[in-house]
Image (cartoon, rainbow, N blue to C red):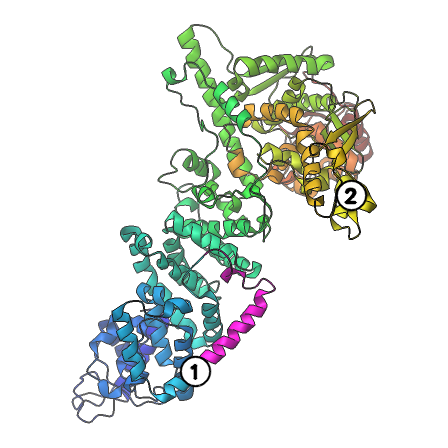
């Protein structure tokens, strides 16, 4: 028995012990009206009432003001007390008259609820309705049959028809009048709901997903009943009693396969607007989420499709309910390496339920399921990365066919990447408290090894922030590096020759492109798997040992050369400050492949690059073709022109005089024409075909005109990342964050996380002068400082607070400049005797720093 039910029952026992039932011939030894009963004081009676409640003792009817209808003990106990009421059927003299007992009600309709509610309001006693709600909402069978659409509420079988006829004959004229009034009220409510539907509030009932439950009727009933506090407890307790049986049905009986309407239970319960309240989060929702997570895949997919037709407000409400449950559970418990959040059944079940809402949010958003890039290059890269002795060495290729596909994604036929604009921003699905307690090393192990027996939150990547996911990717990359190292060692044993366990590049600073291109091209041709070894770069004639910092500078120098406008590989837009592939570039494909390899290696080796691409490049890398909408950030002027063409209200053909032939200028300024359709110069653009023109124009600019360059670029990128979980974890904007880092430089966060060594502390005069100096720098000088100290002028994923910079003391006051170890984000700072000298020395160091030497 739950709190509300127990409270009512204990009160009945207390009154029975203190006041009796009023029957002089009472035979109940636990009643004050019994002849042999010894009177009790109130304290003793209260204790005794608790004992009687525990032992389920006999109750007498009591004509108290609290129970004005003289209900029996059975009737005053909420129906949630289950078997208790079945033991007191001998007190029939205290029951409602037969037609007001409602024991014949085995399922609910909107009209039946209003009928019972009307009777209760007339008697000012809601216990009959509370009992009916408790009985129906705690019964899976009753709930499945409840609130059916009109066409399904008509009896289908002979037995059902006879039952309905018998019930109809038993009704009197007053019942008919009440039912008629309720039907009229229901019709008015439906008309009102239809008006709301015009604004998108009731789209869920109009979509292609057919369910037998009348969702709008359920919503109206909840709105009517939940305003009554007495009803709230009935729904809550009913859900607590319902969930164990539903979980057993789904786990062992495969009920959905035999009765798809079993899904109605979850549809009806999720319409309760109070699910986010503390009582539900504590008592009912953990059990209910566990039930929902047991639904078979087709049922989860159907529920997702149904929810995708709901209004944004409804989807947001469901999302917030599951998010609050996760947050409430996480902050209420303590987790560590021995007690993982992955083992918390409540959090895991809620995350699985939140996944349904997430994909409903995706399905309901602005979808583009077409325009996918060809996968041929990927497959070729995958095939070419096979090692000859792999099977003999017992080393199977991890993720041979690429990253895993989520079963729900496959069932729904949609990917997160297909959604350009979801109903609710993706960021709102991230749960920061969960990210704070997640042990990512353990979660990664579950994701890769124990996925069948252990839950990994990487199967719900939408709930993780980019920083947490980048840590998972880091573990994956490191394990891949160790795997390649092991394979190399085994090859050395088998073949009897010494092989390099690392990807070593020795380049000349003055010929960095030629040297890198030749070396990486040879590796890509001979064995692309070597690209997944740990990278070590050496600049010829320099003594710097690569522990990460040398690689960072190598990447930066390669990109500076490749993106040099004089080379002509990329075009630069002054207005957007972004680069785009030059369709008339004279460079061969190997150069573009090198750029792709560099971007892949940067991700693989956890380096941040100063790359300025529009978002469409990352969408294309993830498998989507560019469309007209992508022109907004890559070619904003062209996008605005085409947008105006689509919205033009005059005579397009006569006023615009445009044909399906377009022209561009090549590298030397000569015009180049291209027919978007065959004989395009003879096809005028009109109001009827302008959408086709805009679509073909966008396709040409973003896909066809740069097909050769981008395929080579993507091939290089895939050589490194094809076996990575990059695609299944990250969205395009997060991939950009991985490669480019954050443009937001929060030096206050950097100061808070910086550590000190060699005698310095945060309270030292020099350190205080240092931070005052750095905070006074302009944006450009701050970027130079970051470049000097860390090897890149960007903040890592998660911001500068994740950088973990070290400032170490490098001797007493001197004229020497500060130095740095970019591999370890360490700044070696002498103890300058004045703030002015510190600023002058630091500015000189960050302005003229270049190259590596041994100190």
Residue 456 vertical placement versus 591 (above, below): below
Q: Secondary structure at mark 2?
A: helix
* Magenta highlight on residue 187: yes
- In the picture provided, is 529 more to the left or to the right than 396? right
- In the picture provided, is 667 more to the left or to the right than 81? right
* Magenta highlight on residue 651: no
Task: Give neighbour class at mark 2: few <14, some 14-19, many 20+ (Cα, 10 Å).
Answer: few
Give whichever of 69, 416 is nearer the camera. Answer: 416
Tell me where residue 660 sits by quadrant.
top right
Q: Secondary structure at mark 1?
A: helix
Task: Give neighbour class at mark 1: few <14, some 14-19, many 20+ (Cα, 10 Å).
Answer: some
Q: Is residue 120 visible?
A: yes
* Tag shown at residue 555: none
Residue 600 vertical placement versus 687 (above, below): above
Nearest to N terminus: mark 2 or mark 1: 1
Q: Position of residue 77 (x, y in %)?
A: 31, 77
Tell me where residue 513 sits by quadrant.
top right
Which quadrant is the C terminus positioned in? Answer: top right
Give whichever of 694, 292 is nearer the camera. Answer: 694
Give whichever of 660, 34 is nearer the camera. Answer: 660
- What residue is drawn where x is 39% and y is 88%? 123
Q: Residue furthest bottom?
A: 24
Q: Position of residue 287 (x, y in %)?
A: 37, 58
* Tag shown at residue 180: 1
Residue, disc 2: 641
Q: Are marks 2 and 1 in contact (CB under 8 Å)?
A: no
**Which region shows up in magenta?**
182-209
Alpha carbon separation for disc pair 2 and 1: 60 Å
Q: Position of residue 814 (x, y in %)?
A: 77, 24
Give whichever of 35, 461 is nearer the camera. Answer: 461
The number of callouts visible is 2
Which quadrant is the N terminus positioned in? Answer: bottom left
């Amino acid at each position: 028995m739950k709190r509300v039910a127990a409270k009512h029952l204990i009160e009945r026992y207390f009154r029975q012990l203190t006041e009796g039932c009023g029957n002089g011939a009472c035979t109940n030894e636990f009643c004050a009206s019994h002849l042999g009963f010894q009177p009790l004081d109130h304290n003793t009676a209260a204790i005794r009432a608790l004992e009687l409640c525990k032992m389920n003792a006999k109750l007498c009817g009591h004509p108290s003001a609290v129970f004005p209808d003289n209900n029996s003990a059975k009737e005053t106990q909420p129906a949630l007390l289950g078997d208790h009421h079945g033991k007191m059927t001998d007190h029939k003299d205290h029951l409602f008259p037969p037609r007001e007992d409602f024991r014949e009600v085995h399922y609910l309709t909107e009209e039946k609820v209003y009928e019972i509610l009307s009777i209760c309001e007339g008697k000012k006693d809601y216990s009959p309705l509370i009992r009916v709600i408790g009985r129906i909402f705690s019964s899976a069978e009753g709930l499945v049959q409840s609130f059916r659409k009109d066409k399904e509420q008509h009896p289908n079988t002979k037995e059902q028809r006879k039952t309905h006829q018998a019930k109809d004959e038993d009704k009197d004229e007053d019942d008919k009048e009440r039912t008629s009034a309720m039907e009229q009220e229901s019709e008015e409510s439906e008309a009102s709901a239809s008006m709301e539907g015009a604004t998108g509030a009731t789209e869920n009932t109009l979509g292609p997903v057919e369910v037998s439950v009348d969702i709008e009727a359920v919503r109206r009933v909840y709105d009517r009943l939940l305003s009554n506090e007495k009803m709230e407890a009935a729904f809550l307790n009913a859900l607590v009693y319902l969930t164990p049986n539903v979980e057993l049905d789904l786990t062992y009986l495969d009920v959905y396969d035999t009765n798809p309407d079993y899904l109605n239970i979850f549809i009806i319960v999720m319409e309760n607007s109070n699910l986010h309240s503390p009582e539900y989060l504590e008592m009912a929702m953990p059990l209910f989420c566990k039930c929902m997570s047991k639904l078979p895949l087709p049922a989860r997919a159907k529920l997702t499709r149904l929810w995708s037709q709901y209004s944004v407000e409804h989807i947001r409400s469901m999302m917030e309910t599951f998010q609050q449950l996760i947050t409430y559970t996480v902050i209420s418990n303590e987790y560590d390496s021995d007690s993982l959040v992955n083992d918390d059944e409540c959090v895991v079940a809620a995350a699985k339920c939140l996944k349904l809402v997430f994909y409903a949010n995706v399905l309901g958003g602005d979808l583009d399921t077409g325009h996918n890039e060809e996968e041929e290059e990927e497959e070729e890269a995958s095939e070419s990365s096979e090692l000859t002795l792999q099977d003999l060495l017992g080393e199977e290729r991890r993720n041979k066919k690429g990253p895993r596909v989520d079963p729900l994604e496959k069932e729904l036929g949609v990917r997160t990447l297909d959604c350009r604009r979801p109903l609710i921003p993706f960021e709102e699905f991230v749960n920061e408290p969960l990210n704070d307690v997640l042990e990512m090393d353990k979660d990664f192990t579950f994701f890769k090894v124990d996925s069948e027996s252990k839950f990994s939150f990487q199967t719900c990547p939408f709930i993780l922030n980019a920083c947490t996911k980048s840590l998972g990717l880091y573990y994956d990359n490191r394990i891949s590096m160790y795997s390649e190292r092991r394979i190399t060692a085994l090859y050395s044993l088998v073949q009897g020759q010494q092989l390099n366990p690392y990807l070593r590049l020795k380049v000349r600073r003055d010929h960095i492109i030629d040297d890198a291109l030749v070396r990486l091209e040879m590796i890509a041709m001979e064995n692309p798997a070597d690209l997944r070894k740990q990278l070590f770069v050496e600049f010829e004639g320099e003594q710097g040992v690569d522990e990460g910092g040398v690689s960072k500078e190598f990447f930066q120098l390669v990109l500076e050369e490749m993106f040099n406008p004089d080379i002509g590989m990329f075009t630069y837009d002054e207005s957007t400050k972004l680069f785009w592939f030059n369709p008339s570039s004279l460079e061969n494909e190997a150069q573009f492949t090198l750029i792709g390899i560099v971007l892949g290696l940067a991700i693989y080796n956890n380096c941040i690059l100063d790359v300025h691409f529009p978002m469409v490049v990352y969408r294309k890398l993830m498998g989507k073709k560019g469309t007209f909408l992508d022109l907004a950030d890559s070619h904003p002027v062209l996008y605005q022109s085409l947008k105006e063409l689509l919205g033009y209200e005059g005579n397009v053909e006569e006023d615009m005089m445009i044909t399906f032939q377009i022209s561009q200028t090549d590298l030397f300024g000569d015009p180049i024409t291209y027919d978007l359709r065959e004989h395009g110069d003879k096809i005028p653009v009109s109001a009827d075909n302008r959408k086709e023109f805009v679509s073909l124009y966008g396709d040409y600019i973003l896909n066809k005109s740069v097909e050769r360059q981008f395929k080579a670029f993507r091939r290089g990128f895939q050589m490194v990342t094809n076996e990575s979980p990059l695609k299944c974890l990250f969205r395009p904007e997060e991939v950009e964050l991985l490669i480019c880092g954050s443009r937001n430089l929060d030096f206050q966060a950097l100061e808070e996380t910086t550590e000190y060594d060699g005698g310095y502390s945060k309270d030292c005069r020099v350190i205080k002068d240092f931070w005052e100096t750095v905070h006074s720098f302009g944006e450009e000088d701050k970027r130079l400082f970051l470049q000097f100290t860390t090897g890149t002028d960007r903040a890592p994923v998660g911001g500068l607070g994740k950088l973990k910079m070290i400032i170490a003391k490098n001797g007493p006051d001197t004229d020497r400049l500060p130095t740095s170890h970019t591999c370890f984000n360490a700044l070696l700072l002498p103890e300058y005797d004045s703030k002015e000298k510190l600023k002058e020395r630091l500015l000189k160091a960050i302005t003229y720093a270049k190259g590596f030497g041994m100190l």
